[in-house]
Image (cartoon, grey):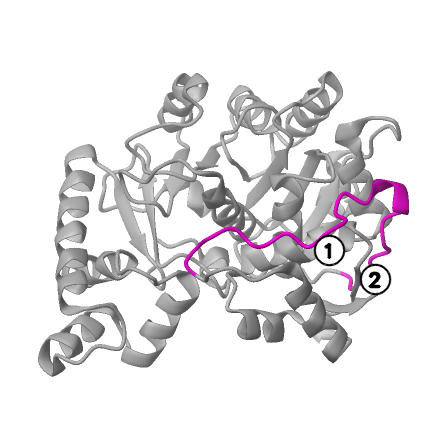
Amino acid sequence: MEEELLYTLALTFVPGLGPKRQHDVLKRFGSAQAFFKTAERQGQLTIGTADSLRLAQRRAEAELSLAARNGWHICIIGTPDYPPLLGDCPDAPLLLFVRSLQPPAAPCHAFKRPALAIVGTRKASHYGRSQTDRLLSELRDDPICTVSGLALGIDTQAHRSSLQYCLPTVAVVGHGLEQIYPTANESLAEEIVTSGGAIVTEMPSGTPITGGLFPRRNRIIAGLSQAVVVAEASLKGGALITARIAHSYNRCLFAFPGKNDMHFSKGCNFLIKSQMAQLLETADDLRAEVAWTRGEPPKSTETTSAPLPDEHHPLRRDPPYPDGEDGGMPLNRLLQIIRRESPAGLEQMAEETGRPLPDLLSDLLALELAGRIRTLPGERYEPT
């Protein structure tokens, strides 16, 4: 197991390999160790170079040493200590770094409970914070843990209220465990760990904090959870990306309704209006839909999303994708695929574009908010 951990960690350090291609390597070779051993024997590489693979192994050795010194646990996909719901996701990370009170060789206690994710804007209003606190107060006796992203605003409120009501809480971050972002939440992170929760990431130490990593973090938040609650959100931002990912994972999705004239209620109202999310008023609404088990997530009702009214369209041109491991591709290329297939399936678009699922879902959400496409049952899309 120790050797396989080393080679799996090394695989994540191979340049140009995102989550999807990492899974492809495991499927082709059977294990990360088999991939590296085959590369050593044959000397002919289609992935990376001999130098890059040796460097990946050295970086993995250093990371394992750092984890051992700090008492971090590293769990590999497919093993008993890896969260099962997350492991079923097509783009699940190969491994997770976990900081908790448990010994490094033991699984995190919080993972033994069914998880409820709560996400929302960093600029939370009193209404958003109070609704989050009230919900968790009503759930204080339920056998769950909560999951959020340790950001300011709704995330912070979700973690703090969970601690107040003695619910274990898991913070998923988009950087290595050697740091905490934002720094204002360093003491909150400590309290999460000492209260039986955990800090979780797929990122190794030394990972720079960049905005492009947060969609990857958001897919972990959605994947860990049986249900996701959007407490307060605008039409743009990470909360709606998390909602779209949760919907694609077939998770139950809920949103608090907000006032029509409040900027940070428009995202929640859109999710409810499009029937992507169920309106959430009390904890009983959750309990009526979600069985608190560690098994398969409940089947969600397939619905058709309505386009957003013209006055709210935030996108009027086709910006390029940001630079990344999959290169750049303008949004009109994605539109071309949807218009050609009409309707186009999510898997087909992911295969044609090579985009990681969180990024692809973010692009589709932008197009939907712009009124360019609409969602059909079964995660299919057609032009408007």
In percent of the image, x 67 and y 23: which residue is there? 124
Residue 279 part of the magenta segment = no
Per the image, the residue denoted by label 1 is: 367
**CB atoms of marks 1 and 2 within 8 Å:** no
Disc 1 residue type? Leu
Above or below, comparing residue 286 to residue 33 in the picture: above
Left or right for 20, reference 320 = left
- Tell which tag, 1 or 2, sits nearer the viewer: 1
Measured in 3D between alpha carbons, the distance from the residue under mark 1 to the one under mark 2, in whole angstroms, is: 15 Å
Give residue 108's position: percent from left, percent from top.
Answer: 36, 42
Q: Is residue 324 magenta?
A: yes
Q: Earlier in the sequence, mark 1 or mark 2?
A: 2
Q: Where is residue 251? Give x, y as percent.
A: 64, 55
Q: Residue at x 27, y 39 (%)?
A: 205
Which residues, given as a range, are shown in magenta?
301-325
Label 1 packing within 10 angstroms: few (<14), some (14-19), many (20+): many
Quarter of the image with the C terminus in it: bottom right
| Residue at x 82%, y 57% (from the top left corner) | 305
Q: Say which mark, if any, is on residue 2.
A: none
85 vs 191, left or right, is right
Q: Amino acid at mark 2?
A: Thr
Q: Residue at x 44, y 24 (%)?
A: 182
Q: Nearer the viewer, residue 13 or 109?
A: 13
Residue 56 appears in which quarter of the rendering? bottom left
User: Considering the numbered disc 1 on the image, is that residue within a helix, a strand or a loop?
Assistant: helix
Q: Position of residue 186 (x, y in %)?
A: 39, 20
- Circle 2 sits on which residue? 304
Quadrant of the image containing the N terminus: bottom left
Q: Is residue 354 left or right of residue 320?
A: left
Residue 214 x/y as whole percent: 50, 42
Predominant secondary structure in magenta? loop
